Image (cartoon, rainbow, N blue to C red):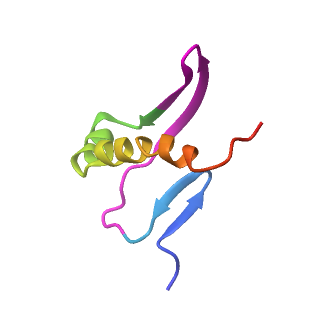
Amino acid sequence: MSDPVHLERGVVLRRDVEPPLPTSQNIYAFEATDAGTRAVFTSTFASAEALQTVLDIGMEEGARSAINQIDGFLAARPAVV
């Protein structure tokens, strides 16, 4: 059996989800601020319906949960200068 997740043209696709979930174009930007770093994550979907589909399955909560773990992840690693 093949891996259910694969990368195609920079987009992660899942083969084990029926029907397939909509994909998005994503931009990740990190900006220096006086207080540290601001992370800006922007996802663009092909339509309002595509966005609503992923919102309905909890994508926003999942993304928020993952993003909120970044500080702890980085704190557990030595600083790179």
Q: Is residue 62 left or right of residue 36?
A: left
Residue 8, relative to residue 63: is it above or below? below
Q: Residue drawn at (56%, 44%), measured in percent from left and top?
A: 75
Q: Residue drawn at (26%, 49%), measured in percent from left and top?
A: 58
Residue most extreme to the top: 34
Q: Is residue 35 magenta?
A: yes
Q: Is residue 38 left or right of residue 32?
A: left
The C terminus, quarter of image: top right
Q: Is residue 39 magenta?
A: yes
Residue 63, relative to residue 2: is it above or below? above
Q: Range of the magenta residues?
A: 17-41
Residue 71: image location, x then y, percent: 49, 40
Residue 35: image location, x then y, percent: 54, 18
Q: Residue drawn at (58%, 60%), measured in percent from left and top?
A: 7
Residue 64: image location, x then y, percent: 36, 41
- Report the number of discs: 0
Q: Is residue 2 left or right of residue 64?
A: right
Relative depth, front residue between 45 and 30: 30
Q: Where, by quadrant of the figure, is residue 16 drawn?
A: bottom left
Relative depth, front residue between 7 and 76: 76
Residue most extreme to the right: 81
Q: Residue drawn at (52%, 56%), measured in percent from left and top?
A: 12
